[in-house]
Image (cartoon, grey):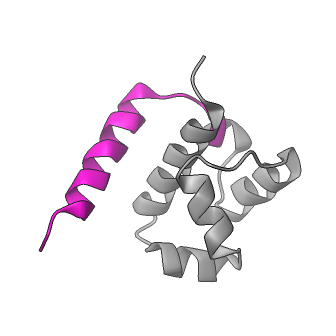
Amino acid sequence: MKDIKKIIGINLRYIRYQSGLSQEKFYAKYNMNPKYLASIERGEINMSVEYLYELAKAMKTTMCELVTYDESKIIKQKRIDAKEKQPN
């Protein structure tokens, strides 16, 4: 079984990236705790179902979208992460 926390983190980062928002703008837009959400993106947090629901609702997506393992999305997100880490 895949680590559900990592899957949620990748999906969250992917959706955030697709929305065109930096972490700071994303957190401000949805009025959420930036440290907590950064930990979620890193797959470190085992959040409650209630928080997952609120997060999905704020992001205008579904809980299912946040917890679904999608290999193609993981590959795309890894490429995005590598591109963002490259020096300008």
Residue 87: give x, y in percent of width and height.
Answer: 14, 70
Q: Quadrant of residue 54?
A: bottom right
Left or right placement of residue 57 versus residue 48 in this view? left
Residue at 57% from the left image edge and 23% from the top image edge: 2
Residue 16: give x, y in percent of width and height.
Answer: 49, 61
Residue 76 counted in the magenta span? yes
Residue 74 counted in the magenta span? yes
User: What is the quadrant of the N terminus in the image?
Assistant: top right
Residue ranking furthest to the top: 1
Magenta part mainly helix, strand or loop? helix
Residue ranking furthest to the front: 44
Residue 86: give x, y in percent of width and height.
Answer: 16, 63
Left or right placement of residue 27 versus residue 19 in this view? right
Residue at 62% from the left image edge and 74% from the top image edge: 34
The stretch of residues the image draws in magenta is: 66-88
- What is the tally of numbered marks visible in this picture? 0
Relative height, residue 60 to residue 49 (above, below): below
Relative height, residue 52 to residue 28 (above, below): above
- Which residue is at the front of the view, 70 or 33? 33
- Which residue is at the front of the view, 33 or 76? 33
